[in-house]
Image (cartoon, rainbow, N blue to C red):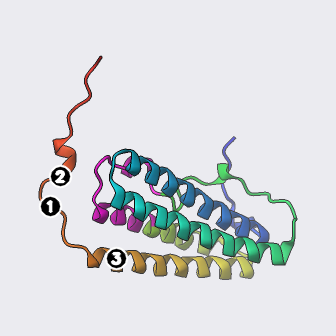
Amino acid sequence: MSQTVDFTRLDLKDALDLAILIEDEARERYEEFAEQMEVHHTTDAADFYRFMAQNEARHGEEIAVRRKELFGDAPSRMSRSMLWGVEAPDYDQARAFMTPRRALEVALESEIKAHAYFTAAIPAILDPDVKALFIELQGDEVHHKDLVQAEIDKLPPDSEIDAEDLVDEPVGQ
């Protein structure tokens, strides 16, 4: 059963648990994308998605350490059913022949999406510690967006020819 997050009732433990789930979902999606890119021999995009998965895992681990220090092994009331694609790239963004630039653009869109999530939640948050955490996470997303944009800026423009236009349609057997 899908639940929604009532930001007005979040305490700091809940907020940290939610942040961990968000990072975990993004890590898993980037790992899935990396596997898809490897299947299609799009190694540059696969390498980038593995890099993003490692970054999401590291950020999730940092939040988990903080949560453990503050709340020990107290059970979580948050679940994956409370979120969908907060920071994870949308499934339909993966393409068989992604360029490194397009892979970075997908990651950039995800960082922008996560920033928007935290920005939209902040006005509803009543707990000052939760509000401070969400402001911190909002700032992290700005930093991540800037890092991805800097990588995009290093790349040459993509070819005018879209590799997807050259892919043969599947045929029945």
Residue 56, how many percent across, how many down? 56, 67
- In front: 117, or 158? 158
Circles 3, 1 touching at the beta carbon (< 8 Å): no
Location of residue 118 by image quarter: bottom right
Q: Quadrant of the C terminus?
A: top left
> 127 above or below 163?
below
Residue 92, how many percent across, how many down? 39, 47
Circles 1, 2 touching at the beta carbon (< 8 Å): yes
Badge number at residue 151: 3
Q: Identify the residue under disc 1.
A: 159
Residue that sits furthest to the top in the current view? 173
Which of the two discs, 3 and 2, labels the residue nearer the N terminus?
3
Give SS at disc 2. loop
Q: CA distance from mark 3 to mark 1?
A: 18 Å
Magenta segment: 89-110
Q: Give me the residue at 67% from left, 75% from top.
A: 62
Q: Identify the residue under disc 2.
A: 162
User: Hey, what amino acid is under mark 3?
Assistant: Glu
Q: CA distance from mark 3 to mark 2?
A: 21 Å
Which of the two discs, 3 and 1, labels the residue nearer the N terminus?
3
Main SS, magenta region, reads: helix
Q: Quadrant of the N terminus?
A: top right
Give SS at disc 3. helix
User: Hey, what amino acid is under mark 2?
Assistant: Asp
